[in-house]
Each structure stands twice: as structure tokens, then as C-alpha cells.
Image: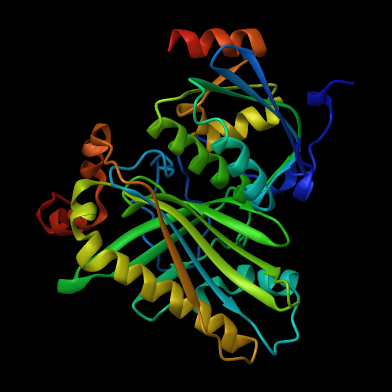
Amino acid sequence: MSDENGIKLAVRERDPGVAIIDVEGDVTPAAETPLTETFEELQGATSVIFNFEGLDYMNSGGIGLLVTLLVRAQRRQQQLAAYGLSDHYRQIFELTQLDDAIQVAEDEAEAIAATKEA
Amino acid sequence: MTDDDRTPRDAPYWADHTTELRVTDVADGGDPTPVEGRRIAGPLKGFGKMWQKTYRVRLEGADVTPEEVIDTWKERYEDFWPETATFFAPLAGVQPGEVALISDRQPGGLTLSTGVFVLYADERSFSFMTPEGHPFAGMITFSSHEDDDGITVAQIKALIRAQNPLVELTMAIYTHRKEDQVWFHVLNALAENFGVEGEPHKDVVCVDDKRQWEYFGNIRYDGVLHALLRPFRRP
């Protein structure tokens, strides 16, 4: 777990090849190093799922950071999903079209199922 | 209380969800036609390679805080642009949800008319997203912070793809250079405004070297193409 720069990240392996990143705190440009390093450690995963239940704050720089991570995951042909987004952050995902690149699920089970179906 | 019952700290800074852009009150002279009713085209919706271009200038010697830089930048955004382009600011200012118009002279005497959507604005940053018809599908974030030496830095981070194949063709020979010129001019003008001579720097990362052929059809909204065809349209 990293607690640098307003963000805490923890990685769990729920099923073989399915990595879940628990995000707690702020997603801003200050989170670039811990988020990128965590993401790079998951190169072998077939699916990466973001748990945003602990997301407390996000600015547009944070959205830009997520976009670059998602594009990198697509290049690796990893399946992506997210859950735990409040209505507010769901709307931001829609507004910025992030929801086109990442499947947004209600909960962890749905997110895992979504990445397996894709 | 559930998460959805709380007002998130960042809520005031984000634009409300929208599907089609509506141009309301902007400074006189802008042409709303190429923007009205268009959809936002973020960096995931473009045709060309995805680039992350970061431009920054250290305001060394200027007695100014990051908040003061952003306040000035938002308030007088158009003053820092080069003379070849005009930014018609929303009358409400650079506020979340507002639309600004842009008129940009192109080679051959053409004028590109387009705009930007204000996605986000807080005390230390603001972001624009581009609409269909803009040369880029992208998001541009203007921010200010203090570096490790305590010097205030002004920064522009563009996360962009060429919106259509025509623009992609021009990227290497013209469009990258043109974009660099615009943002270097903006940062130099901003530094000058605060009484210092800046030395802007640029970092470029190719985030995705693949072209997204499913967005080939974006060409139908191309602003330059529309400017070329305008004389042949029925009134």
C-alpha cells in the first residue's frame, strides 16, 4: 500500500489473473507516481479492476492520469472495470467519456463478471 | 449517510453532465455555428496517435502565488493568445460548463472556427475539452504550482489525438509545430504579465502510437474542411 500524495492504493488478487486496485483518497496529478507504479506491477494480469469506494476527491488532472493508464492497459489487451463510484463520479466518467474505455459496475462481483464476459 | 448523500469536495469545480454543447453568452465576434449542438470529443474519441504534451514555465522572480496565476489566467485568458488566433471568452468567465469560441487563421487565408468546453475549474487549475470539429480530440489542463525550490510554475498539459485523418496527416509537418508555437507564446505572455522573462520547456510523450480507425468518420466535422466548403453552401 502506498500513502503518498493523498492517495492510498492496495492491490488484491481476487481470481487468478484478476487484480483489484483499492483506491482511497485523492486522484490528482500528485498521484501519478504511485498509480503508475502500481499499474506497472500488474502487467501480467488479464483484468484490472478499480475499486473507487474510497475515492474522496478527483480533479481534471486525475482524469487525465486515468485516461493514460487506461490506454496503456488497452495496449496490453487487459480488461478494465471499475466499481464503487458514487453518482457524482459516474457522471464525471460519462462526461469525460472514460466510461467508454472502462466498464463501470455496481459492485466487485459484477465488475469481475464484466471483465470475464468482455 | 451514504456516499451519494454527501456533496463531494470537488463537485463545485466540475461541469454538469452534458451531451451536446450549447453556446450561450460569449464575447462579440465569435461564430457559434461550428460548436452549437456538437458533442464533446475527449482524448479517447480521436483518430490519431495520442500525445501528452506538457509545457511549463518557471516564474522565477515573480512575487505571485499559484492561485494568483490561475485567477489572472482565467480572467484574461484571451489576452495571452497569439495575434493569429482569437479566443471569445464566455461572458460568465472560464467557469465549469461554459463554452468559449475560437477563431484561428490558417495557411491559405482560411479561418478555422471552433471552440472549447470548460470541463473543470478550481483555484489552481482549469481544463478544456474539445468539441467535434476541433483539430484535436482532447483535454487541455492549465495549472500552477510551486516547484521544489518554491518557484511558482505555470503549466499546460495537453492530452490529445488528431481528431481525424486529415489533421493526423498534418501533425508531423505543421500541426505539432503550430501547437507548440501557440502554447510557448501563451506561457511567455503570461510570464511577461508577471514581470519576468520565462523560458518555457516542453515534454512530449506518445501515450498511444495506434490510430483509431473507428473514428475515421470524424472527418465529416473537420473545421477546415467546413471552412473550405462554406462558399459553396446554399444560404
Q: Residue furthest right?
A: B1
Q: Residue furthest left?
A: B232
- Compared with B24, A18 (above or below) is above
Left/right of residue B145 with respect to residue A71 in the rendered view = right
Work out which quarter of the rendered image holds the C terminus of chain A and state it. top left
Q: Residue at x 74, y 69 (%)?
A: B67
Q: Looking at this view, is B104 or A69 the one in front?
A: A69
The answer to whether residue B96 shows anywhere in this view is no
Q: State the quadrant of the N terminus of chain A.
A: top right
Q: Is residue A13 left or right of residue B232?
A: right
Q: Estimate the x, y position of residue B60 in percent, counting from the top left.
A: 66, 86
Where A102 falls versus B61 (above or below)? Answer: above
Residue A25 at x, y = what percent?
78, 39
Along the line of sight, the residue nearer the viewer: B48 or B15: B48
- At 76% from the left and 77% from the top, the residue drawn is B150
Decide: is A18 above or below B45: above
